[in-house]
Amino acid sequence: MGNDAIRRLSTAASSGEHSACPTPAIQTPFGCSMNENLQPQSIGGDRAPRAATSAPHVDPAAALLFVINAGAGALDLDAKRAVIEAALAAHGRKGELLSCEPDDLARVASAAAATAVARGTAVVAVGGDGSLSTVAQAAHEAGCPMGVIPYGTFNYFARTHGIPTEPAAAAHYLMDARPTPVQVGAINDRVFLVNASMGAYPELLQDREAWKARFGRSRWVAFVAACATLLRAQRRLRLHVETASAVRDVQTLTLFVCNNWLQLQQFGAEPEDTLAGTPGDGSLAALMLRPIGTLSMLGLMVHGAMGRLGEAAGVDSFEFKHMVVRPRLAPGHSEVTVAFDGEVARMRAPIDIRVLDKPLYVLQAPGAAATASAPEAKT
């Protein structure tokens, strides 16, 4: 593993208390709108049945494999290890701790997922939504279950699936959890858990990291950074968008695709129920933001901050299961900047976004459900 720290643990039972206390997050205000020319179009089965798969087995005697992003969250690496060790000891379980820097996360996660399949165990992602997404990519490809110990700012994935957002509680929770199928999306060949986007939103994420480096990691810092980015966002995307029901030629500041009902609920931008299932459980939701002036943008941000984005003029949302996006690019260019679960990358056009037939198996307690609710309006 190179410079990755690996620790093998065989622990005895001890006692400990834990509690889950998900809290609402301050949301980045943004929305969508577009000029469209609708025509009948079929690009594949929006209503195609999901492939039947059986849940992978987890041997309780096998060591769980913890992939720790050493750069995620406010706590240091020793504190994260202590949380995991305490939970293992309390439940008489074994574990291997694989810690790495962000640049090595994909490689370590892929190796851990392959080992998990061979041993009949699970890989556990320790970090924020971006880290979870990287581990999910490896777990989904390998076919092994994935556990979650969240250390992020918003922790949408954990909150939506009823996983405690306090790390110690989450570590205890997964010890008795079982693999449960959850929906994942894909943008080209990249799995995403929460959202994927093009346009102003990837720029927003890059700016937010710069603000965090300067002012610290907090939801308020993320919120203010988002406002600053959106107020100066003027670059238009010209997109040809195809779904199973329509073709749209659009001009937009951002295309945002959501696989997480909680995030949509907190924006107040849930699309009308036009497909079977809901975003994150049967479909994806798309939001677009029309290029607008500064005053209109301020109004839009107010609606977003109050969780009433769907009421703002110029915001459009719709559901889909498969969408192909063909951006109009400058001559000689074939790639576009995209974001997925907080990570930013370049991808070759066209951009294919879809609900994957194969689910991701996440360690959840029997009967677990999302415990978070939409936030109250913020003033």
Image (cartoon, rainbow, N blue to C red):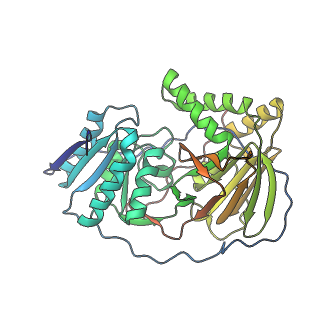
For the C terminus, give its image quadrant: top right
Residue at image point 64% right, 33% down: 226
**In this orientation, which residue lies closer to the viewer: 87 or 146?**
146
Q: Is there any visible trace of residue 120 in the rendered image?
A: no
Residue 146 lies in what quarter of the image? bottom left
**In this orientation, which residue lies closer to the viewer: 113 or 74?**
113
**In this orientation, which residue lies closer to the viewer: 337 or 70?**
337
Residue 271 lies in what quarter of the image? bottom right
**Looking at the image, residue 2 lies above or below residue 183:** above
Residue at image point 45% right, 40% down: 152
Q: Which residue lies furthest to the front in this view?
A: 332
Q: Is residue 357 left or right of residue 172?
A: right
| Residue 34 placement (x, y as % from top left) | 81, 50
Q: Is residue 216 left or right of residue 202?
A: left
Q: Is residue 79 left or right of residue 300?
A: left
| Residue 65 placement (x, y as % from top left) | 27, 53
| Residue 53 placement (x, y as % from top left) | 43, 76
**In this orientation, which residue lies closer to the viewer: 93 or 102?**
102
**Looking at the image, residue 141 lies above or below residue 85:** below
Residue at image point 81% right, 30% down: 294
